[in-house]
Image (spheres, rainbow, N blue to C red):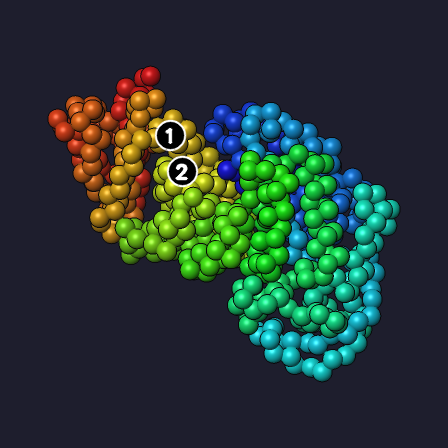
Amino acid sequence: MMQYFEWYLPNEGKHWINLQNDVDHLYEIGVDHIWLPPFCKATSINDVGYGVYDLWDLGEFDQAGNVRTKYGKKEDLLKAIQLLKQKDILPIADLVINHKAYADGKEKFHVMKVNPENRQEMISDPYEIEGWTHFYFPGRANKYSDFEWHWYHFSGIDYDATNNEEGVYLILGDEKGWADDQSVDSTYGNYDYLMFADIDFSHPEVNEHIKQWLKWMVNETGVKGLRFDALKHIDSHYIKELCEEINFTQGDDFYLIGEYWNPDLEKKLDYLESINYQLDLFDVGLHMNLYQASQAGNQYDLSKIFAGSLVKDNPLVSVTFVNNHDTQLGQSLESQVEEWFIQHAYALILLRQQGLPTLFYGDYYGVQNGEKSPSYQEQIDPLLHLRKYHTYGEQVDYFDHRNTVGWTCLGTQEHPYGIAVVMTNSEAGFKEMSMGELNAGAIYVDYLNNHSGKVELNEQGKGFFPVNQASVSVWIDEKAIWD
């Protein structure tokens, strides 16, 4: 999968057109899932898309200062999706339904102010405020839907317009309150509230409206999957019900993934069980291991790089990644893997058979705003080629040294040329590994060209595969390069 955006993309409105022009290339490098950026109208054309204003506006109406979104107009989005599907690349929509922003009007309602560090602690008596909670979308003029959002459709808000005061405010009313403690993350006592106007999924009108919109959006765009944003802030009971509805209406070929940002494996496993394993999760634990390994250098124990990861425990539901938009420099979850470890990290997700690896736009094409990050395409392209043609057959791990680790993929009849991967975060080293007797006497070379030597396998197909200091090498039968 490729995450086809990064936080600092230029605000030119040409992203959908750029994607159209890139489809053939994406197909050639082996991408078969595309995670699209949020394409609903947000607070402005500078908004990356997570400050959602109108779910029903895909870049079609003059609202929030423009017709287009940051990424372009609706017709360009639809064409890009059509071209992706023609190449059998699954377009995946980024589903941002936790909150809404940039309301059209204010309303009066009662709240209690809560402690931002403990949302279960009320620090005021009930009182009336005026808040930005009325969404009626005058620019769309009821096309597609005449639903209006009011204060009672939300559980919390971050701004008291009456007193010009910021904070976290629990909206009061019949059957209102934060989601149950067991159904959202426990950070800050109860992490139901994240930002802006927090949607109350217990309200029956909200429940029905979201389902209607989802059905319309999928039919209107033709997307073949959804990425759920901010899952740990949304009632898991509601997500379970919503996934059941989607799976029933869209069928088994429709792909669901979610962001539950918590590196703790047990938390993710508990969440997956609570929703009956109806979607895959991004492997935040593995990302944090990769980040910490890049920070610690030779002090990090590479033999434990998969410790506590979802891909190790349950690879069938794991979506692995190196970096994403939230981990970029300057973002709230900043944890960008260091440049020296990028090829290591991508080898660890692309050249192994467990999980669905994610290629990040910012890593592949570079960050396009200032000096944030270069393009690592030259380092990643050889790994993509190896994944597409050579990462087949039995996988054997050699994670028996804290600084130098390796693994092999022995190949199949259809893909006979396997690989031997070795990497180190310290001094130059080697790993004795076997490619099996069928490869006895073969001459192996480093496909990445990080090491200039050659390895001749013995009569058992074993060899000593070297690696240079703080480097990674992928050894392959030199005949495979000729073929």
Residue at x-position 78% and y-position 50%: 64
Percent position of residue 453, x then y: 22, 30
Mark 2 is surrounded, within 10 Å at the Cα level, by few (under 14), some (14 to 19) or many (20 or more) other residues, namely: many
Mark 1 is surrounded, within 10 Å at the Cα level, by few (under 14), some (14 to 19) or many (20 or more) other residues, namely: many
Percent position of residue 315, x then y: 40, 45
Dot 2 lies on which element?
A: helix
Residue at x-position 69% and y-position 66%: 155
- The residue type indicated by label 1 comes to Leu
On screen, 426 above or below 352?
below
- Using the image as rendered, state which of residue 119 and residue 206 is in the foreground: 206
- Using the image as rendered, state which of residue 479 and residue 352 is in the foreground: 352
Residue 328, labelled with which disc? none
Percent position of residue 16, x then y: 66, 34
Residue at the farthest left position: 459
On screen, 171 above or below 74?
below
Dot 1 lies on which element?
A: helix
Viewer can see residue 330: no
- The residue type indicated by label 2 comes to Leu
Residue 350, labelled with which disc? 2
Question: Residue 459 vs residue 217: left or right?
Answer: left
Residue at x-position 20% and y-position 24%: 438
To which residue does mark 1 refer?
Answer: 386
Q: Are the two marked residues, 1 and 2, in contact with CB atoms closer than 8 angstroms?
A: yes
